[in-house]
Amino acid sequence: MNKTKQADGMFNNYNKVNEIFHAKGGCWKIISLNCKTCPLRRKCAVEQLHLDSQALMHFAKKWMQHSKKTVYISGGITGMPNFNKPAFERAEKVLKNNGYQVVNPFNLDHTKNATWEQYLKTDLDALLMCDIIYMLKNYELSKGANKEFLSAEAWGLEVQYEK
């Protein structure tokens, strides 16, 4: 018998209904998505599947070959013309074209954020869910981007730089 539960944002790298993956001690199938509840706006209901060990190993190998890495875009925003949004949008397009799932801070839910620190906390929560941080040009000039960079290094994320 399969077990259904709410995923509480722990399966954020998956974005298709019926997608199957291995995590948290079992194989799971996404049965619904709700894109407004976690920092990446994804929360899914999942169903635990019971697979024998041979099927599980086959699935795990296949999953590792096809899973997309998630990239967080980091760069200066405060004090920049148009908040530097065009640079973030260009980077998002390039990264998606290269096969990555992309987290653009402009697409995060900042509706409850009133202060710079609250914005940063929301962004760092999203960064924590990613595999890679992508640093835009001149990120060194940004207090927030430097904090994101240092956090990513501390968490062992891969760091890529805009050319």
Image (spheres, rainbow, N blue to C red):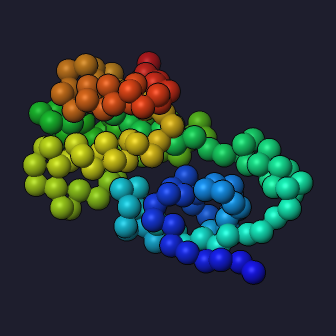
Where in the figure is residue 124, as x and y percent of width and height? 31, 42
At 82% from the left edge and 64% from the top edge, which residue is drawn?
51
Q: Is residue 77 above or below residue 43?
A: above
Left or right of residue 106: residue 92: right
Where in the figure is residue 97, as x and y percent of width and height? 57, 40
Residue 142 appears anywhere in the view:
yes
* Image quadrant in which you'd find residue 79: top left
Residue 96 appears anywhere in the view:
no
Total marks placed: 0
Where in the figure is residue 26, as x and y percent of width and height? 69, 60
The quarter of the picture where the N terminus appears is bottom right
Farthest residue to the right: give it: 54
At 22% from the left edge and 32% from the top edge, which residue is drawn?
144
Q: Is residue 134 above or below residue 27?
A: above
At 47% from the left edge and 28% from the top edge, which residue is drawn?
156
Left or right of residue 127: residue 68: right
Left or right of residue 10: residue 30: right
At 20% from the left edge and 26% from the top edge, which residue is drawn?
142
Left or right of residue 31: residue 38: left
The quarter of the picture where the C terminus appears is top left
Farthest residue to the bottom: give it: 1
Where in the figure is residue 160, as x and y percent of width and height? 47, 24
Q: Is residue 34 above or below residue 147?
A: below
